[in-house]
Amino acid sequence: MATAVLTLLLALVGAGLAYLYFLLAAGGRRASSPGAAERAMRLAIALPAHNEEAVIAASVQRLLQCQYPAEAFDVHVVADYCSDGTAAAAEGAGAIVHPRGEGKRGRKGYALGWLFQRLLADPKGYDAIVVFDADSRVDPAFLQRVNEALNAGQAVIQGRHVISNPAASTFSALADADMRLNNRIRNQAKANLGLSARLMGDAMCFHRGVLEAHPWAEASSLAEDREYGIHLAAQGIRATFAPEAVSAGQATAAWKDAGAQRLRWYGGVFELQRQYVGPLLKAAVRDRNLAALDLALDLLLPPFSTLAIAAAGTTAGAGVLAALGLTSWVLFGAAASLLLLAGLFPLIGLAAERAPASAYRALLHGPAYALWRAGIGLKAALRRGNVPWVRTRRTEEIAPK
């Protein structure tokens, strides 16, 4: 019985690691040559903001400095149930402000859905809507890169989100390393394989035709960005990755604040598992939709942190049982091999991404980070979806005055 249980656990961990290593190998950056865009699409930039007075002005100013025809884009900020000076700060920086104090509240998705309706009805006739976070610091060429993709026929585009404050704390350094790996395996690899990239909440672009045919309101979970991408993939609409379109955002610096944020994300993922695994598998079989199959696997397989902990626990258990003569040392060797592969995975990924030394130093805290994430995931699972939305605190709000 012990051997059978260990063998099953090893098979599950091995399958998960094999999938991640496959994506790691497929995630090499490919040179892109989209060519000159035929025309400058008219773009609406959407920023949802709830009490973001500390960061919104700098984000708007950075966006207005993009290397793109000034007459071809506008920056819109929805001041969502704000009790501070967000609206005044955004307007003073040059944004078109939409105060919102009615309807559902408590999630970024509610504000975005409300703003999308207004922008699609705007007489300026925007060709596409680009979404950023309130603290985004956008590369000047971002809109150019998105415009090239739109002209090439892409309807849903995910830019490359990077961490702007990796030196702020141990946690932000870990978040930087994590994001580098995610951009490679969740976005670049999927683009290279012709699958659908993961929508990440920041640096997203949607052609108006997509939003008209598939309203944002169809996404209702705590992970509404990822959910919307899953919904589109099930309909045969693929999100593409534009690595040259870069947007930098802050990572939470304190573990305590990050815990509430991660709990919200995991709560959203459990909602997505219950709601979408079945439809995705049906779409994969019915329509031979490989993107839908990949997203179903993405929801079903445990995250890397869970796989790493399972590999360590299985190795320890196999060692004890082998010493007691209850299983073979061969099984222990197999478990130890998987543990080694789990330990090497982030190192190989960061090396492939040419990460700075700070990312490798952050990995010294990797075991604690993995245990912390697993604990948050367990807490979210026990709450069975009863997870509140919590606003992310910005560095500027907690820095000493």
Image (cartoon, grey):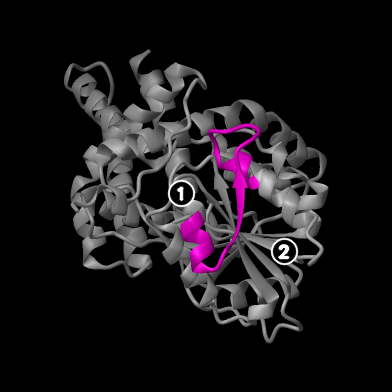
Taking the image as drawn, is residue 28 in sight?
Answer: no
Q: Callout 1: helix, strand or loop?
A: helix
| Residue beneath the point at 61% across and 25% down | 274
For residue 319, say whether it is visible: yes
Q: Tag on residue 20?
A: 1
The image position of residue 392, as x and y in percent, is: 40, 43
Q: How many marks?
A: 2
Q: In the image, is residue 136 above or below residue 217?
A: below
Question: Which residue is pictured at 60% across the width and 48% down the height?
Answer: 99
Q: Is residue 291 above or below residue 60?
A: above
Q: Nearer the viewer, mark 2 or mark 1?
A: 2
Q: Label 2: few (<14), some or many (≥20) within 10 Å?
A: many
Q: Is residue 243 above or below residue 134?
A: below
> Which segment did they paint magenta?
88-112
Horizontal and vertical percent for residue 73?
66, 72
Dot 1 crowding, Cα within 10 Å, few <14, some 14–19, many 20+:
many
Q: In the rendering, at what x and y percent does residue 214 appear?
A: 78, 46
Q: Are marks 2 and 1 in contact (CB under 8 Å)?
A: no
Q: Amino acid at mark 2?
A: Ala
State yes or no: residue 262 in magenta.
Answer: no
The disc labelled 1 sits on which kind of residue? Leu
Residue behind mark 2: 128
Say which of 73 and 378 sits in front.
73
Residue at image location 77% in from the left, 56% down from the top? 120
Q: Nearer the viewer, residue 393 or 228?
A: 393
* In the rendered image, the vertical position of residue 243 relative to residue 276, given as above or below: below
Which SS class for mark 2?
A: strand
